[in-house]
Image (tube, rainbow, N blue to C red):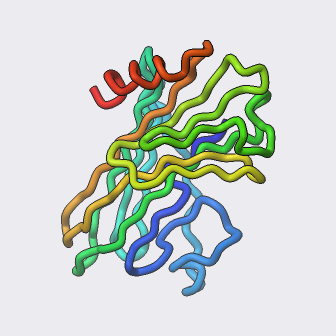
Amino acid sequence: MVVDVPEAIDSDLGLLYLAHTHVPTFWTERNIQLERLEWSRRADGALNIERRLPNGISFTVEVDPTRDGVRMSFTLTNGTDRTLTKLKMNPCVLLKGAKGFDQQTNENKFLRKPFAGCRSAEGNRWVITAWKDCRTVVANATCPCMHSHPTLPECDPGKTVLARGWLSFYEGTDIESELRRLENVMWH
């Protein structure tokens, strides 16, 4: 499984960041190439990455493994002189390389805010993602992937916005009980 956090960042300025290269961004339209960055791993197993865009906008992602799952946080700081509106951060859970979860269908997925989940071909294993203050959940059968998209508020100059996410695995058949359990552990 690959988790793109973020896969994309969009705003009233346009597409500010895209983890892929198949769609033009604010920067490629200006012939500006963003530096390739790698994640840093801490001694406790957590991952983080920081990126500063050429216009002063920066973002940081923290990925912290816990006993129950993986907590993710995304912060965006507005280093421009104008308020950023229509902010969207789209994380993506890519399933193509995950044996048993890689079927090109949405029949094995559930989409219920804030949760997006995928059931294994055997039917007894699940991968679940969620983002707090979720605006949409979607899946793409041909990729295959699934998304839980957080809502981001407007961001004034010099200010920072935050989104919190979750990823976990479940083995069993009572997915409803697992979702209720996760509601009590994800953000605490």
Q: Residue at x 40, y 73 (%)?
A: 11
Does residue 43 show up? no
Residue 6 vs 14, above or below: the answer is: above
Percent across and percent down for residue 56 are: 33, 71
Image position of 178 with respect to 105: above or below:
above
Name the image quarter holding the C terminus. top left
- Say whether residue 131 is visible: yes
Q: Quadrant of the N terminus?
A: top right
Where is residue 172 drawn, in percent x and y?
A: 61, 13
Q: Residue at x 34, y 22 (%)?
A: 185
Q: Quadrant of residue 100?
A: top right
| Percent coordinates x, y for residue 93 in the rendering | 60, 43
Q: Is residue 139 above or below residue 35?
A: above
> Residue 183 location in percent, x, y?
35, 27
Instruction: Give left or right: position of 51 versus 33.
Output: left
Q: How many marks?
A: 0
8 vs 54: above or below: above
The answer to which image quadrant residue 180 occupies is top left
Viewer-side residue, 98 vs 176: 176
Residue at the location (57% across, 19% down)? 170
Which residue is depicted at the point 30% across and 74% down?
85
